[in-house]
Structure formats: C-alpha cells, structure tokens
Amino acid sequence: MDVNTPLGGSMPIEATPVLTYSGLLLTSVAATSTHDYTVAFMGTATGHLKKAVVESVTSAFEYSDLQIDEGKSVSPDMLFDKNKEFLYVMTERRVTMVKVQECLVYKTCTECLDAQDPYCGWCSLENKCSLRSDCAEAAQDPLYWLSYKSGKCTTITSVHPPQIQRTTARILNLVIDNLPVLEGQFYCAFTALGKSLVSNASRLANGVSCATPHTDSLPAIPPAQHHFTAKLSVRMKTGPDFVATNFTFYDCSTYTSCTQCVSSPFPCDWCVGGHRCTHDTGENCRNDILVTGISSIGPSIRSGPGFCPRINTTSGGSIEILVPSGISKRIQVKVDNIQPIIASTRFVCQFNIEGRVRQVHAQLLGDTIYCDPMVFAYGTQAPNITTAFAVIWDGSKPLDNPENIHVLVYRCQGMAQNCGICLELPDKYSCGWCQDPPSSCQVHEQCSTDPTQWLDHSQTCPDPKITRFYPESGPWEGGTNITIEGINLGRVFEDVAGGVKVVYDADGRTIAECLPHKENYRKTSKIVCQVESPRNLTTGLGGGSISGPIVVKVQNDYIARSQKHYSFVNPRITSVVPSKGPRSGGTKLKIWGLHMDAGSRAEAFVDGLECKVTGRRSNYVDCTTSASKDKGPGKVRVKFDNGLRIFEDYNFLYVDDPVIGSVESGSGQRGTPKGIPSGGISITVHGTNLNAVQQPMMYVLVDNQEYTSTCKAESSTEMKCWSPAVPPSKLDFSGDEAIELDFGFLMDNVEKVKNLSERPGFPKFYMYPDPLYYKFTEENHIKYYKSDYLTINGQNLDRASQESDVLVRIGTSYCNVTSLSRSQLTCRPPTSQPHARDISGLPVPGQLPEVVVEVGDILKFPIGKLSYELPSSHDSALSKPVIIGVIVGGCILVIIVIIILIAYRQKSTESSRVLKNMQEQMDVLELRVASECKEAFAELQTEMTDLTSDLTAGGIPFLDYQTYAMKVLFPNSDDHPVLREMQ
C-alpha cells in the first residue's frame, strides 16, 4: 500500500477571516480558551502583542494592544506556562513574560466591563474586578459575577429624595439595578469629611430603603460652603460596599442674601421680613412675604432672584461709582422690589474704606436711594482703591447687591505724572492738567478757579521734552530710523507730523528732515522717524561728520529740543577677522572699523551671501556667515541703513569643510577618546582642513544635553582638544566599567563632524571615574625626600590619563612625571628644595613646599609637604662612647659569625662523607637484589615446565567459587565463621 500519496483535490478549502488588519504584519499567534470564549494572542512585526476575543466563526474583536519591544519583530515561538496564566513572548534580544489578564487594574464596574476582557468580570459582593475563580460564590447567582457580555453593573439608578436639609432626617428609597439576591442584613453607609455613619437598610422589590443618620452625628458644613456631598453606599454586614452613589446634605441657613438663597440648586426660600433663607417656609416664614427658590417645588407668584429686594443700578447705569479722593459727593442708586415692610424702615448707606466702615443717612424717593454727602479719602499711595457699598434697612438688613455695585475712589495725580499722560486718561475720571504750581493732574474741582489754568482732553500740553533718542549717529546717506522718547510729544500723530528735524545747534538751520512713522507713534511719549540725508552729502563722504540736536514741534506751538546731538558719520571697515571659514558657514566674523554702530540697522554680506549680524559696537560688527556652494574669495560688505561700505583690502575666503579621520586620547588605546567627569584630558584629532575653523569645540552627549570643551588646531591635519567636564550627578558608574557616550565636534556649521560616534569607523567616547591621589602617610603628611624619585599612590590613575595630562607641583617648581600606573605615579623632583608658594603663586621663604597633583583644569589633590632635610633627631652628632660601643659590638659580631661559619663547614664535610658511604651501600644492595631476581625467575620457569608436564588430559584443575573465594580472602584460615552455614 502506498502511504505517500500526496493530498489533493478539486475543491479548495475556503474560510472567512474573523479579524483582519490593514498594513500590519502578524508574525505569531497563540490561542487559548476561558469560559465560553476563545482568546487569541497575536505578535506583530512592530513588537506589539494584540489580544482578541473570537466570539464565533464569523465575529471577533481586539480588546488590548501591548507594547513588548518597540520596533522588534515578535518571534513565532509564543508559549503559555503550565497553568496558562502567563504567555512567553520572544523578540530578537528579549523574552517577556506577559500576564494573560490584568483584572485588578480596573477599579470600577464600568471600567471592568468596558475593557471587554473575557478573563475579567465584576464581582458584585466583593466590589472588585477579578477572574471568575477569584469571586466567592460566583456560581450561585449570575449577578454575583458580571462578565463583559452582560454589560450591566449593579448601580443605584435613583435616590428619593436626592438631597435633604442637614438639620432634618428622612427615609431614603434607593432604586438599584442588578442587585444580587442575598441573605442577611443590608446596610447604608454615609461617608463624608472623614466620618462614616451606618444605618440599617430594608430590602425592597427594586432596591433598599434606609434612614439618614441622626442630625447631631453628621459633620458640620465647611466654612463658606452651603453643602457637603457624602458617599452613599450599600453593603452587607461583612464585605466591602458593592454599590455606591453621591448624596448631598445642604443647609439653607448658610445663605445670607435673597439672591443667593433663591438661586441655589437646593429647595430654599427667602423670608423678606425675617431676612433669612429657609427650607421650611411653613415653620419659619409665617405671615411673611416669601420669595421662592428656583429649585423649590410648586407654584409661586414670586419665584427667583428677580423678586429679591436689591440695588439695581446707579443713576448712570454703571456698577462703578467714581469719586475723586478728597471730594465730597452724594451717592444715589436705583432700587427694586422694595416691599412696604422695607420702605417703612430707616435706611443708611454703608461704605468700607480701607477697612474702616462709615455710615450716612439715606432716603428712599421713588425707586432711588439718596445717600447724604460724604468726603471720600484714603491714605495709601495707590492710584485708586475699591470701596464696598451697601444699603442697610431696619438697622442690619442689607439690600441685595447682585451686580456688586461699588465706589472707586481715585487720585488723578497717582495715575499720571505729566500732562500728556494725564490728558490721555479715560474720560470717566474727568482728569485734567492743572498748571497751578506745582503742576499736576487733578480734577477741575481741585484746581484754581481760573479756568485757563486747567487743561482738558481737547487741549494740547505745553512744555514738550525729549528725554532720550537712539541711535545717536547714522550714515551720511540717511535712512536711519530714530526713536525719540519724551513727554508731551503731542496727543495725536498729526500734532508732530512734519515737525521733526535735525538742526544746527548754533542757528537752528535744518540739517535734515526726519519723517515720522504713524504706525510707530505712541501718544505723548514716543516718535519713530526716518532721517533724510544731509544736504552737503559730498562733504560728509569725504570723511567729515556733522551733528546737531533733534527738534520736535508740537502743533507749531511748542518746541522740544534734545540735549544730546545726532551725528551724521562715515562708517569705515578697517579689517575682517578671521579671513577664512568653511563652506558650510557658521563662521563668526568680527568686522573692525570706525563708527560701526551707526544707524538703526546694519546688514553684512560676503560676496552676496548674508552674514547674519549678531551684535555691534562703535569699533566692530559681529556676524555669522551663511553657507556657500563654492569655495573661493568674496568681498565683505556692510550696509548701514542707506549707506553701503565695501572692504577692499582683502577678501574673505571660503575653504573646504574640515574632515575628521581619527580621534584618540593617547592613553593606551589608539582611536578611542577617553575622559573623566572633571574634564581636561588631552585628546588628539587627525584629519584635513582642521584649521579652517577658528573656535572648534568638542562635546559629549549626556541625557540629550551637550557638554563642551575647547580645541586648538595645531595644523591643517592635527587638532588638540581637552575632554569636556560633565557633572558627576549626571553619570552613573557601576563597577569598573566605563560609560559609553556619544560625542562630536562643533566646528561652525559643519554637520559632518557632529555625532561622530554614530558614523562608521568611530567608537564611542569612554568616560571613566575621576582619578584619586592619596596624601602622604607620614606624620603630618610631611615626606622626607631620600632618593631620586617621588612615588604618589592612588586609584584609577591611568584609566583615562597619561603622563602629559598630570602636573605635579612642588612649591614654585615641578616634579617631572616619569611613569603612571593604575595605582602609582612616579616623578623626579628638582635637585634642591623649591620655595613654598602662596595662593597667587608667589614664593614664600621659610616654609616647606606643598606637593599638589593637578589633572586637567579642575582636579587638584594636595598630597602633603616635601622636606629635603632629615628629621632633627637624625642630625645630632653621635657621642664618642657610643661610637666605641658600636665598633666593639661590631667586632664581636664578626667573630661570632666566623665561628659559626667554621662549625658549619665541619658539619657539612662530615655529612658529605656519611652520604657518600650510604650511596655506595645502596649500589651494592641493588646489584645483589638484581642477581637474586634473575635466579628466582629461572627457577620459576623450570617449576612451571614440570607442572605442565604432569597435567592429564583433563586440563587445569578448577576450584568451586566458594573455595576459591575463601582461599583468596582467607588463605591461612581453615575454619572461618564465613564458612559456616547460616542457622
């Protein structure tokens, strides 16, 4: 039978996908089941894991998307653990254990069911989102554990009444959907403001009913509040709340005005005569005029804030009553809804000025309250203050003031210090310029009786002044925008149009007109005008200058003249530094010359390409070059407003961009730049055109922040840099490993030298911990110099540094570093002791020089002091008896040594002789043993021949195993316990 017949047929197998993705590649699938659902886990080519529920052969939906390894394809090998609680997901370099469900992250029933996770459901009795297996008694009632398919949470749909007065107690009826059938006592819990109060609840057909807590047990309503919201929850005797809603306790008596009371969201009403807000009008508003609240139930002829007794508007229709400080004024306001019970009482107007309350008598005439005249004044230096205002009736009951009508007391003098600003104040203040000495901004009532001494808004201020102008010079060709600032410089643009010019100081003749710009004019204080070129332009371009004051005519009535002079000058370029730069641009040019700050604007160019001006002074202009397509020379031009100046002495040269070939620190690993957090480690850069940039810099990148250091081009092919300093707090050294950082160079606008570590052929920058040099261990850290070299101990000394990076100072001199290892530095001190040095580097005679190790520009380690002289105890001369004693002792010691050597010689000779005799005896013994062995072997051969000849045809006799074993193990024992039979 052929079992290898290939499968085939004419009917294709077809299936309809239950879930499709567009533009997304699925790389792996793992499936499992939970309850009545099939769950598919799908890995993608972008490193995500998608979760989907397959509900039937025709429908499925995705309910979760997890990021596993962004950008990395998920491997097809996805596996569940033994209990199918976790899924192992693998990418190229990572294996992730993913929990198949995260039910506990959902805190509410709605969140739980909206997640549509087939593993998860809402456990009603325990008030949590969980697996079905983690919900107690889930099998007893479908409402105990709600799956996402049910879509129904246990919820309180309504509470009747929905809110109550805090000072009353009521029975509440709670309508609850999907309430499980439970045996036992229900409870209602009220939780608010740190207190939780519980009352018994009775089960109803559609929910439960329970009483509100005793009023004396409820927390107080917070100050400036009118209610508090409690959490109303239903629970069993044991277990958490399984359903909750908000319930409000309010207090109408906290409202102090009619408008607030009847506008509140609670059923509060206002008693007009009693001037109080209440929830129970039958008890608290008998025989009183009532204004019902907008939230109250039932019909009413006076409902809402429109029926409250109140201040309506002022006589001018404004909510702000303006009163100049120091002026007596009679305030009057409109009122509305004044009932006879109010009109029959006494009225007063109350003002609160700077915390002081003042009252004046008031009269009600028709619909207007007239306050008695009162002087309004305040003591602070503020330009104005707001004064609270109220109309009081019946001694202590204020009319409502819903629009916050108030009195604004002001001082004109505080709002304007000169005439121009004073006359520009809003008309509502009625301020004008009082010319009575001292001149000031006042209302007309506070100025003299002479009407000519008070200027109103329609008049022009006298005595205009120019306080400053800029720039103070410009090119002879004109076109400079001069900004003039001052006071009283006209009220409208037409006051100064055509009246600005530069004049000769001596006779006032016009040098040049200055045409004001209307769009830049600021009333009374600022004029911007463009100056024309002087009439004798040829003389100016010859090298001379001319200057004069700026004059502003206001309506041809008043003239302002500047103290300083404006000068027409001839700017001139004298040199350009540097003279070359890379084609990519970014070179910072300094263009030196005369009058380089002339004009309101300067533009620089190199052969038609813009050089962006970044700053200028009287003797130079700073600019940054643009990129050029070609290399080669270009003329430098600077345009000062309408004047163009060209530098003819030499051209700026665009050269090829620098190219970096290698970067190395020279501390042992070629091609690898190294550094320390303190910076200053020497780094050598090789390449081409490295001297095309004047201020090259090196940088390392830490947390997307650049830390830079300076470089210096030694030639076109070599550049010397120093490693950048990085704050240690930004680095995390673990063990002895270096931190790899991205690095690059800032060379004007050359992009190819940036981010070198990301380019092929370049390594990372290696950052090592700072070296640490130890102090001298001698007493007081004073080392006595005894040899040609000085050794200093430490750690991490040569990981990034080499000998040239370390400088050892000894006072005013140096110690020549000869070797550097991981834990030691060796250097050769000067032959004679150097002088000590003070903080400024000057020699200090009579003190020991201090040894200081410097690494880079920042790290300095004081090691101790070095003395070229021995301690004082070594310098004292030895006495004669001591010398004799030493000599005698030395002789005796020599004699003893000689005796020991003779004895050792004799003993050694005797030992050699004995050893020789023993060797001879051993040789004789070896010969004898060899001879005997030969004879014994010959005899053995003969005996074996005799034995074999005696053997019969039966062959060699064999012993049984027991006998053989006994003869081998116990050859000399005929009666051994082992031979006996076991009893």
Image: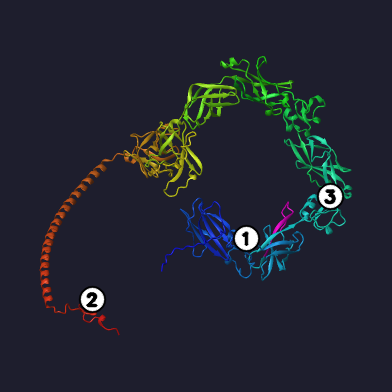
For mark 3, give the secondary structure: helix
On screen, residue 646 versus residue 393, left or right, reads left
Magenta segment range?
Answer: 219-234
Q: Looking at the image, do the residues carrying marks 1 and 2 touch, with CB atoms under 8 Å apart?
A: no
Q: Amino acid at mark 3?
A: Phe
On screen, residue 565 versus residue 162, left or right, reads left
Which residue corresponds to mark 1?
113
Crowd around label 2: few <14 · some 14–19 · many ≥20 (10 Å): few
Image position of 267 with respect to 475: above or below: below
Which residue corresponds to mark 2?
969
For mark 2, give the secondary structure: helix
In percent of width and height, residue 867 lies at: 36, 38
Q: Amino acid at mark 1?
A: Leu
Residue sitting nearer the eye, 570 or 735: 570
Residue 888 included in the magenta stretch of the image: no
In what quadrant of the picture does the C terminus appear? bottom left
Which residue corresponds to mark 3?
307
Q: Looking at the image, do the residues carrying marks 3 and 1 touch, with CB atoms under 8 Å apart?
A: no
Q: Amino acid at mark 2?
A: Leu
The mark that comes first in sequence, 2 or 3, is 3
Image position of 958 with respect to 696: above or below: below
In percent of width and height, residue 841 lies at: 43, 32
